[in-house]
Image: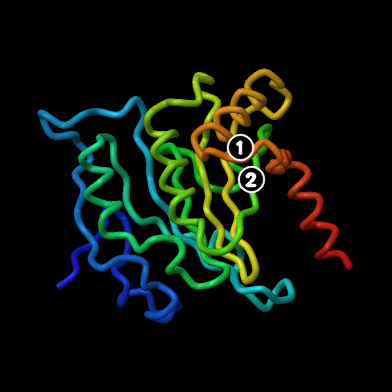
């Protein structure tokens, strides 16, 4: 029998989501909040989230925060691999599904206090590359390879019909030095060709673009 992640529901306990939509793990495991002696402690603690968007008119679909489903938290290398080894890879997810990996205390929402003045680097990739790019990105993030202090908030992989999207979020959109270093590190850890297009978008811009669509 599948056990619960800390603070979450098992797949078959969520009556608002079909089992097909939530086939995101082969089993769910308990991760203690304390880090066992002998584990390799990470500089920060992190938590995994999952969401699946249902395109439609406002009012006819659940809100973004209602779609967010907390999965688990971890604070060591060993705890990360325990969780990650049971999650399906992004390429196996249904379209409009997303995995979010953020520092504990920061929700994967534009309006979160830690994200409100920040933005994200966005990389659009062809189908079939999401799993490898996602793994390389989050391992670089956990390993503190971006070298920008506490600027990194988290990362998201988004599955779409014709392409997939990888993004990394930071706290301060107007810190040009930090955002440029994040961009350059992202190119390196994903081994991107020199002509690869990376787009930086502030969360304020994202909020305004969504609001304008809803007003149409």
Location of mark 2 (residue): 110
Lateral position of residue 175 relative to residue 93, left or right: right
Residue 216 placement (x, y as % from top left):
89, 68
Q: Which residue is drawn at 50% across and 73% down?
A: 94
Q: What element carries label 1?
A: loop
> Which residue is pictured at 77% across the width and 57% down the height?
210
Separation of marks 2 and 1 at Cα, in angstroms: 6 Å
Task: Answer left or right for 89 relative to 25.
Answer: right
Q: Name the residue under label 1.
A: 115
Disc 2 residue crowd, few under 14, some 14–19, many 20+, Cα 10 Å: some
**Label 1 Cα neighbours within 10 Å, binned few <14 / some 14-19 / many ≥20:** many
Q: Nearer the viewer, residue 53 or 148?
A: 148
Q: The N terminus is located in which quarter?
A: bottom left
Specify the quadrant of the image occupied by residue 77: top left
Q: Residue 90: horizontal and vertical position, in percent?
A: 45, 61
Q: Are marks 2 and 1 in contact (CB under 8 Å)?
A: yes
């Amino acid at each position: 029998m599948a056990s619960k992640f800390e603070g979450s529901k098992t797949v078959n306990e969520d009556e608002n989501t079909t089992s097909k939509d939530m086939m995101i793990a082969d089993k769910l495991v308990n991760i203690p909040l304390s880090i066992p002696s002998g584990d390799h402690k990470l500089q920060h603690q992190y938590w995994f989230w999952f969401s699946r968007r249902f395109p439609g008119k406002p009012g006819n679909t659940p809100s973004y925060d209602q779609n967010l489903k907390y999965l688990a938290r971890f604070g060591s290398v060993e705890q990360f691999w325990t969780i990650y080894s049971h999650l399906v890879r992004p390429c196996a997810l249904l379209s409009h599904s997303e995995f979010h990996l953020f520092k504990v205390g920061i929700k994967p929402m534009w309006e979160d206090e830690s994200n409100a003045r920040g933005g994200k680097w966005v990389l659009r990739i062809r189908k079939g590359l999401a799993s490898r790019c996602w793994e390389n990105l989050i391992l670089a993030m956990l390993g503190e390879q971006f070298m920008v202090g506490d600027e990194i908030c988290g990362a998201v992989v988004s599955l779409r019909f014709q392409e997939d999207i990888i993004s990394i979020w930071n706290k301060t959109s107007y810190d040009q030095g930090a955002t440029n270093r994040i961009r350059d590190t992202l190119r390196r850890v994903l081994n991107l060709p020199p002509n690869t297009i990376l787009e930086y978008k502030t969360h304020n811009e994202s909020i305004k673009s969504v609001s304008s669509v809803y007003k149409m």
